[in-house]
Amino acid sequence: MTHSRLHFSLAALLLTVSVAAQRTWIVDSRGGPGVDFTDLPPAVAAASAGDTVLVRANGGVQYESTRVEKGITIRGVDGASRLRDGMLITNVPGGETIVLDNFVIDEAAGFDPAIEALANEGTVVLERIVDPTFTSHIGSLHVDQCKLFIARGCNQSNRSGPIRFIRSTVFLIDCTYIGTFGPNATIECTDTDIHLSNCYIRGGDGTLLWPGCQWYVDPGAAIVGNYHCTFTIGKDCWLQGGELPICAVRGISLGNNGSNLVDPEAVIVDPTPSRLTVQPITTVHPGQGLLGGTLQVRTVGPERGATTLFASLSPARPPLLLPFGAVWLDPGLIIHIDAGAVLPGSRMRTSTIPLPHGSLPPNLPLLFQAVSLDRFGRVALSGPAITTIQ
């Protein structure tokens, strides 16, 4: 999936967020004319699916947490409202959407995450949620068995426990997630498809670690994928491992557990790159070619590495692994197009191929493959991609 297609799919998914409000309820701790309730729990109890609950900030007053099991919109107004001890969102039926928007989480206590989304067939959306590091809970977010979870514009920090996504489909857009301390990654995923766009995720500082911390799963990592996760990461994301003096630190770690990256275009920062266990996938993406014009082919490879692009007029046949130099491999079968460096801060190169009239027959399928060489000397071959010359 390319970055533009990722945004297109996000736009389509986010259309599900538009819910026709049936009634608007006003919550204001001061009471007064036009106010329906002075705290949040009775307002949620009174609301029906499709309703909107507006919670007035009132200069930082704390509203009580509650349990939500229906598709309603709960929105802080007149500034970010404050919610004490988080919220549980569970059993929202299919076809409904719960939106929690514009809240600061305060004083979440005990060993429960500040926000939990559990067993929801409906869509769960968090927008503009701020969960600062001084709250006392073990983790800021736990999502389990959610058919579709979307977070937009959120800024959440974990403490001794990670943010967890389990058995869910997750979209994170314009979000920041920061690890603080403790022997865990900032985000841990299990059996989850996760899509990131314009996110910044940083591993924690590991101040609770001690010798022998190898028992933990990648402490200080920004993201860890456990057991069959798929990550689609936009190029405008930044994933950075934390600063740990005694343990491996990773921007992203997938291990050998069936997890994988799909077109990872993020800037992935690892303070100890020799310990990085994941080699970025090399992919090739041809555009549409028109005789008399040009064909653009995008290759995605390792940052600060090199890629070489090949074309073939016949069924897929792997080229020799020669990532440098203008060479022909098997003339008439596999054609070397070009090679070049992938610059720091980028994971993409674009090759422009002229297509003069008469050079190729129309409706000809062309197959492309790319070879990459990363800065550690590792070579990778992309899968084939086909386009038709018109």
Image (spheres, grey):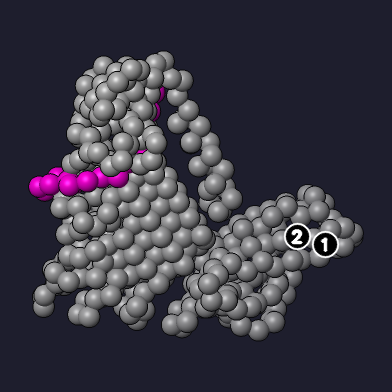
Are the residues flagged by discs 2 and 1 in contact, CB closer than 8 Å?
yes
Percent from the top left, x then y, of residue 22? 41, 15
Report crowding for label 2: few under 14, some 14 to 19, many 20 or more residues within 10 A (C-alpha): some
Is 110 included in the stretch rendered in magenta? yes
Q: Residue at x 22, y 35 (%)?
A: 63
Task: Give the residue at mark 2.
Answer: 295
User: Magenta region: which residues?
Assistant: 94-113
Residue type marked 1: Leu
Q: Quadrant of residue 65?
A: top left
Q: Residue at x 22, y 80 (%)?
A: 245
Which is more toward the observer, 155 or 19? 155
Which element type, helix, strand or loop, lies under badge 1? strand
Percent from the top left, x then y, of residue 312? 68, 64
Percent from the top left, x then y, of residue 145? 27, 38
Q: Classify 136 as above or below 256.
A: above
Q: How many marks?
A: 2
Can residue 375 be seen? Answer: yes
Task: Give the residue at mark 1.
Answer: 355
Residue type marked 2: Leu
Question: Tag 1 or tag 2, which sits nearer the N-term?
Answer: 2
Which element type, helix, strand or loop, lies under badge 2? strand
Percent from the top left, x then y, of residue 226? 26, 56
Is 307 included in the stretch rendered in magenta? no
Report crowding for label 1: few under 14, some 14 to 19, many 20 or more residues within 10 A (C-alpha): some
Which is more toward the observer, 345 or 132? 132
List the single residue furthest toward the right.
357
Q: Classify 20 as above or below 264.
A: above
Q: Residue at x 16, y 50 (%)?
A: 137
Give how far apart the Cα atoms at labels 2 and 1 are: 7 Å
Which is more toward the observer, 29 or 216? 29
